Image (cartoon, coloured by chain):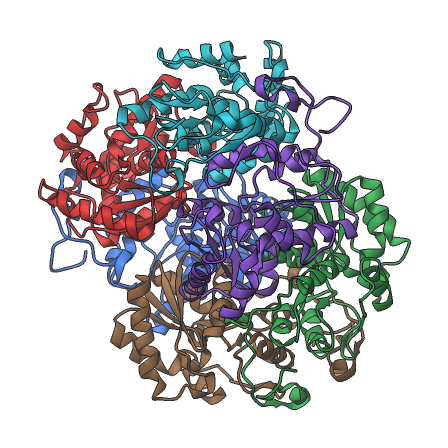
Chain colours: A purple, B cyan, C red, D blue, E brown, F green
């Protein structure tokens, strides 16, 4: 999955390194998985000019922005923003039905509650997103466009990136892969010379002791993670 | 802090046990702290009829609802709902300014965007909420009520519960402590015989392997955590 | 109807007294009925620690809060709040189609416009809600859950309370009776020691003369109703 | 008050008859007053081509629409709609501070939550709105316009109509009296030949017995009130 | 088309003069048409007491308000406001599917996002709205009412005005023609003696040079257009 | 102005050509100016891979998307989206007070109604935005950040781009120039290989005759502009 996502990302930028945290779930398909993916994500936010969190739930985005040494972009965030630049309305095609509400919550957070006309599940687990699955995802995308009378498709899982061109060809409408979208937005921020504001919400967290299994996560006064 | 919160909770119910997770931050004052508090919280959700997450950010509430063996109530959620039962508008008094946006986000999620007229910071770190701090919190509450023309105060930190009565006395308006509010709502759910829906959003997460430091968090097919 | 509602309420609390006003409509199925039910309701708000208005339109809730000598909870309000504690989305099952918009208005007022996914009418008049009607209500509830992809059911009439357990059994999802929900919330407020704020919206009304048929409703300067 | 309102109304239409119900409060300054004004209002909805409810809380508007034999317009509704035809934003000047939230609720219901930039109280009781009060109302209007950076003033009490021209002269911006606005809108509906829809929300209420003091309000099957 | 619209308008007011700008598209069916209709509209805003822009997209409404010498009313704006005076919900019947989003945007701007339950296209080009088209428009209106469970119909094209009575007869619900609605609202403003506020948004535009084909549009310091 | 904007744009991309339409107003400071700027803009949408409309009102964006042969990005749209990638809240600093509402409308359209905490005018006409004006703009930006408790500044006029770095230096927070932001987003779309959807809203407009001064704008069936 990490390799596949990296390959997709490199189609739009030569400068991407794809990494997978050493701790956490094999895939993210629930709030539980998402919560436990975040600590691992937080260990990887150093050494680059900008960061992309390559999971459509944008897990840990706020925490990452507090501690990363450069801007951080989520893939749902990026995909939804990009969709609104080429359409007035979009549908999201996601993996499992249980993640539908999560996509709606993100659409609301990113100001896309009106533009996002529906979230449709393929009921394919993330790790089963192989070449054959493309057909089913394309069919759901086509049906979503028709049902929602929407104008573009947002792929609701970082693991669907390889299908982008094929689905776009079939439905004759913009199809947005969040990973590629986020990479171009992250590079945009680097070129604009802007990074996360340290006023208010994303100021560096106050240092303090951490207990038990997570004691290594304690931030020290002098330095970010 | 845990003892103090337990004592407050027991003022409204004899059945409360207060526990503090064995892993995670000493207090929660950032998205980073919140993210890293969640794994510890998720280890404590068994053996009771209902659960209260005693931090005003309601960390891990969605994940907790997926895996707990009874209903779970957040303290921000409870405090805001209760405030709307005794007023049309409320102000939140929180600890650090950096958590203001978090409170606004929660107000929005809980349908209180219109009722919540303002979030005001005392700029007191959570672990400094001792007896002397009560004066400052009361002053901020009084000023908030006047400035926002609001009708009730929601205490924006589980550690402020001991101030509830004193502040209510001073401002002559309802003051809501989230911990006490959440305990009464959790008991309400038990008495109503309802628990978290397993349709859609909060169905049991699909089991899968977990890597590294967090490998013990893997859910097995046969059982919740 | 009053006895039946009282019996339901006492399943969750031994302290409930159910009363029916001496004036007003036999049932509430229109704005007209609702408006004319309010004077009677306002005559009953004394002598208890807290009050529940047992009609899903929450008739007279604001006026009741101004004059009652303790907190007042509406059943739609309570049912919707409780539903959001055990699900992310719910459907309302109501009696007549003409009350659908009223339920939507209440969902909006109580901050549940996003959580309330649909309001579905059984087209059964309130006073026909006998044992046999339970089947139809259950069928509508089941269809609502499927159609709205929602996770819980709110019963949209105080007279449906006796069906709660049976419908929950059939649909395997939380079913919320507003009367029971409101009773537990009213008791929560009593235990929390909070009552209606007298700042702003719910301050005691200015006394003044009342004319004609309603002259007995005039508030005197020295006392609430 | 009734005469004064009638005189204002007749400035924009020769066809107005002003009536005051035989039962209810001397003025409306609380939810309690409003609730108890509604029965009286409901007895007056016959014999005209269209009806205006001349109180800024639009009391009983929904019930009135169900039973009146012609269209019914509220003065808050009319004033807010008219204000949006001549400006992008307005402020409301009301009598007592306790009615501020009511005006905000109405702005929300009538789709003016964004356009209504503020509601400002003069703290003058309705029955004290004499010639001298005009000065104070004008001052509050002027301050409201400046504070809210709004572009028009909506007078938040039917009893302020006589001040309209004088305040408009002083502030050099549109000032909308709800009574006059509602009269012109009611006449518009008559000229358009449209009246209240009998589909759904405003269908004729089902007839049923009414008890006690209000028994005369029972609707019979064959006829509207 | 201009004659037909004028005839409809004169059914509700004897004082209407219908004019068509000397420049611009033959009909308005796209953002492109709308943008290029505006300059022509702006040349016609003089010599009357009030102005109605007789195209359902309300093209140039804001610009018109800045420069017209009297109030300006849009037909979508008027139709939607009037619909909310006689119903709680309405459906819009429009010409081409590509204008659906435009109607939704206008509903949102005019505070009718909740009241507008759907926008339905007949797929009839504006200039084909002849007598025979009435049948199809009526069928779409009937289906819209049923599908959206709405209570009134707003005709989404100024060219549909001649169908108003026939469709109302068939569906037994209010049908609103924007042109007639706007004419009555424009006359209401004249009778109320209010015109566009010159505070803020609609102050007279600063004069400046205009280049090329549009150089005649330059406003001079001393006078409006 | 055109040269200056071009120079700013080329700081983030070597591929920008800055053009100014041959017809229309010297600057855009009103709805009237904006409406009359659009025809000129529509003549320039050919020969590039993507287009940026370099005026903060995003004039003609929808019409441009219908007819341009590549994606089109507005500068307000781009600036607001980028601001949300590096902060939770921003303030807009604009030229004249009369454009404040326009910025609020755009924030609402682009889903930034919550993130945009305020719009502040410098009261400097667009064509007076010289080197000396930078000081005043910086002061307004600083005051806006403090007053709104916001975390980033969006420059509300394409002519302010040259101030970006200086203001960022002074306020130590992200400052977003819409022109630079839009250029990077337009390039992102090109790299992603997506362009405006031709489904629904932005399908090619139906061809038709255009009259008078604008007759050259008629689209022919076979080709876009």
Q: Residue at x 59, y 44 (%)?
A: D140
Does residue A204 appear in this view?
A: yes
Residue sitting nearer the eye, B86 or F174: F174
Q: Residue at x 54, y 63 (%)?
A: A88
Residue sitting nearer the eye, E170 or C20: E170
Residue sitting nearer the eye, D220 or A167: A167
Please, which residue is most extreme toward the right here?
F132
Q: How many marks?
A: 0
Does residue B170 appear in this view?
A: no
Residue E217's x, y, as percent? 73, 79
Residue E172's x, y, as percent? 25, 71
Residue B205 image-quadrant placement: top left
Residue F44's x, y, as percent? 73, 77
Q: Is residue A175 above or below residue C90?
A: below
For this view, does A43 lie left or right of residue B117?
A: right
Residue C1 image-quadrant placement: top left
Q: Is residue E106 above or below residue A177?
A: below
Residue sitting nearer the eye, A6 or C168: A6
The quadrant of the rendering that contains the C terminus of chain A is: top right
Q: Is residue C80 above or below residue D88?
A: above
Residue A63's x, y, as percent? 63, 34
């Amino acid at each position: 999955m990490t390799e596949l996502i990296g390959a997709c990302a490199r189609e739009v930028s030569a400068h991407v390194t794809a990494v997978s945290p050493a701790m956490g779930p094999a895939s993210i398909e629930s709030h539980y998985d998402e919560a436990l993916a975040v600590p691992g994500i937080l260990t990887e936010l150093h050494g680059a000019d900008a960061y992309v969190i390559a999971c459509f739930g944008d897990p840990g985005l706020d925490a990452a922005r507090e501690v990363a040494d450069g801007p951080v972009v989520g893939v749902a965030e990026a995909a939804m923003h990009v969709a609104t630049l080429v359409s007035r309305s979009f549908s999201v095609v996601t993996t499992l039905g249980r993640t539908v509400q999560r996509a709606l919550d993100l659409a609301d957070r990113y100001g896309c509650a009106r533009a996002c006309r529906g979230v449709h599940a393929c009921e394919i687990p993330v790790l089963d997103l192989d070449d054959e699955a493309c057909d089913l995802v394309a069919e759901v995308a086509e049906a979503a466009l028709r049902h929602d009378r929407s104008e573009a498709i947002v792929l609701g899982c970082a693991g669907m990136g390889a299908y982008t061109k094929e689905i776009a060809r079939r439905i004759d409408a913009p199809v947005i892969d969040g990973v590629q979208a986020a990479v171009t937005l992250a590079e945009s921020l680097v070129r604009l010379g802007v990074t996360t504001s340290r006023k208010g919400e994303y100021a560096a967290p106050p240092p303090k002791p951490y207990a038990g299994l997570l004691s290594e996560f304690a931030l020290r006064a002098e330095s970010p993670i």
